[in-house]
Image (cartoon, rainbow, N blue to C red):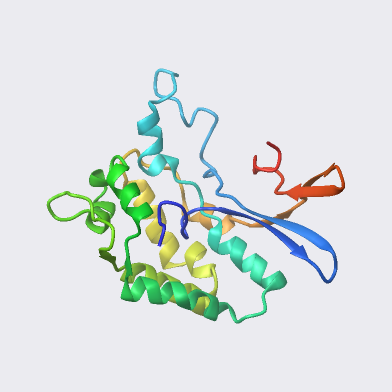
């Protein structure tokens, strides 16, 4: 219900404390660059950095998503409820719809370039181009179908099946196309990382290590 902040197409960091074993584990599900991205990926033909808006909007800025795989890894290690049951509330929301919150309405109204992308335009804007507002209902049957597939089969269809093919197609066909391939998606692995910890007075403070910057800063 806050697609501007989260979703299957992004990444995640998770810090997990197991009280029974007094074990702290962190999980890295951050997006990664496609394998074809070289050091000059963000440079234009003249060798200068490409303009910010051109870099941000479109397929070029899309990383290989980590969210489905890192949650699957976390569930395999620590999950107690059935995997499919955890996805059901999101499936219900996507299928039956939810009212746009004040926060999401503000994001729709202020985000540049939505009108330049047909899928986003059809989902977030009215036919006349005005933004959908607080309280209007958003329904997303395509997301519900994706979540049902992940609920039934795990993350594999997302990374190796028909969803992967559609992701690569969308990234490659977008404005400022990206270089992501199906091999990039199939090769993605979420990983356990060593947390960053330090003493502070009587406490030991711990958080996510690299590639996150959070606990370091």
Question: Residue 60 is drawn in which quadrant?
Answer: top left
Residue 138 picture location, percent across and down: 29, 65
Q: Looking at the figure, which quarter contains the C terminus?
A: top right
Question: Residue 145 is drawn in which quadrant?
Answer: bottom left
Residue 168 picture location, percent across and down: 41, 53
| Number of callouts | 0
Out of 136 and 17, give the one closest to the viewer.
Answer: 136
Which residue is located at x 30 percent, y 49 percent? 108
Left or right, 113 with respect to 128, comes to right
Q: Looking at the figure, which quarter contains the N terminus?
A: bottom left
Question: Residue 39 is drawn in which quadrant?
Answer: top right
Seen in the picture, residue 170 relative to 45 is either above or below; the reply is: below
Which residue is located at x 28 percent, y 41 percent? 113
Left or right, 28 with respect to 123, comes to right
What is the residue that sits farthest to the front in this orientation?
A: 202
Which residue is located at x 55 percent, y 73 percent? 154
Residue 26 picture location, percent across and down: 72, 56
Seen in the picture, residue 88 relative to 48 is either above or below; the reply is: below
What is the residue that sits farthest to the left in this orientation?
A: 128
């Amino acid at each position: 219900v806050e697609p501007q902040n989260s979703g299957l197409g992004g990444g995640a960091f998770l810090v997990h404390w197991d009280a029974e074993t007094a074990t702290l584990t962190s999980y890295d599900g951050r997006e990664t660059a496609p394998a074809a991205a070289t050091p000059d990926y963000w440079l234009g033909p003249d060798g200068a950095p490409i303009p910010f808006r051109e870099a941000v909007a479109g397929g070029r800025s899309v990383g290989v998503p980590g969210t489905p795989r890192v949650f699957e890894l976390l569930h395999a290690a620590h999950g107690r409820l059935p995997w499919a049951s955890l996805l059901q509330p999101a499936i219900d929301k996507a299928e039956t719809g939810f009212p746009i919150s004040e926060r999401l309405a503000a994001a729709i109204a202020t985000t540049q370039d939505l009108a330049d992308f047909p899928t986003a335009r059809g989902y977030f804007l009215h036919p006349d181009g005005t933004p959908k507002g607080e309280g209007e209902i958003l329904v997303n049957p395509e997301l519900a179908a994706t979540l049902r597939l992940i609920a039934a089969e795990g993350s594999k269809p997302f990374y190796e099946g028909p969803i992967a093919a559609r992701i690569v197609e969308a990234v490659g066909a977008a404005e400022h196309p990206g270089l992501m391939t199906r091999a990039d998606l199939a090769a993605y692995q979420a990983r356990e990382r060593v947390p960053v910890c330090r003493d502070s007075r009587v406490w030991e403070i711990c958080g996510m290590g690299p590639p996150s910057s959070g606990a370091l800063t």
